[in-house]
Amino acid sequence: MKAGPDIAETAALLGDPARANMLLALLSGQALTASELAGEGGVSKSTASAHLARLETGGLIVQTKEGRHRYFRLSGSDVAEVLESLMSLSARAGRPRTRPGPKEPELRDARVCYDHLAGTLGVRALDSLAARDLVVRDGETLAVTEAGRAFFSDLGILPEAGGRRPECRACLDWSERRHHLAGGFGAGLLNHIYGRGLGARVEGTRVVRFTAAGRRWLDETFPVIEAA
């Protein structure tokens, strides 16, 4: 018998198309009802309930109750990062979703990945931080330097706390196939963008749409640094 966690059981939970679509819908970071997730999965409410029970038992989602309603969300940022990585792998393997939809270009430009910024702009932010030695990379491990802490502090950005979550980490971006900033500082950055009205999530999607002022702020705060 092999020792260690049973990855096959967890992989089986992700292998069903309806469950996969439900989990991807929760990548927005927003809690959804069973009825909403049934629509995302393209199944009946009773079938959705069975799927959600399996996902909850498997530790991939959690539920909360508000009055008569039950809401479901991903159990943590680590689940979101696995899903984003699988999307990147599927794209590389030539397995695109069959109906990309009208907002596909916007989705690739800037989107929510659970609680942090992903897409072209998310990757650019991390590249800019690394080029100025505000963060240092070691594979998927990131560390904020003292200069980086001063940079975030000057912006008024604090890392969002949460259990054993690291202050920052690299999350593989499915559309760029490179890393964007996740972890506490990644969540703090996205909350800062929302709080200052620089951008907002488009209702019903994962798209983050920036204002003109928000675009200028991004250009000034995270300039593109050409490699020497």
Image (spheres, rainbow, N blue to C red):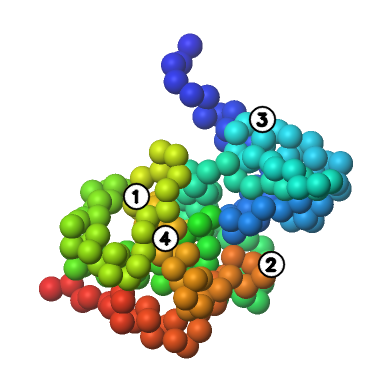
- Read off the residue under disc 3: 57
Drawn side of residue 65 relative to residue 192, left or right: right
Q: Amino acid at mark 1?
A: Glu
Q: Position of residue 67 (x, y in %)?
A: 81, 47
Q: Is residue 151 above or below residue 197?
A: above
The residue under label 1 is 167
Q: Earlier in the sequence, mark 4 or mark 1?
A: 1
Residue 135, percent from left and from top: 24, 58
At which x and y percent is residue 165? 41, 43
Residue placed under numbered mark 2 in the picture: 204
The local secondary structure at tag 3 comes to helix
Q: Residue at x 64, y 67 (%)?
A: 205
The residue beneath circle 4 is 188
In space, the residues marked 4 and 1 are separated at their CA atoms by 10 Å
Q: Disc 4 vs disc 2: Cβ atoms closer than 8 Å?
A: no
For label 1, the crowd category at 10 Å Cα-Cα, with few meaning under 14, some 14 to 19 and many 20 or more, is many
Q: Amino acid at mark 3?
A: Thr
Q: Which of disc 2 and disc 4 is earlier in sequence?
A: 4
**87 with respect to 20 (left or right):** left
Which is nearer the eye, 140 or 208? Answer: 208
The residue nearer to you, when weighing 153 against 54, is 153
Pair 4/3: label in front: 4
Q: Residue at x 75, y 39 (%)?
A: 51
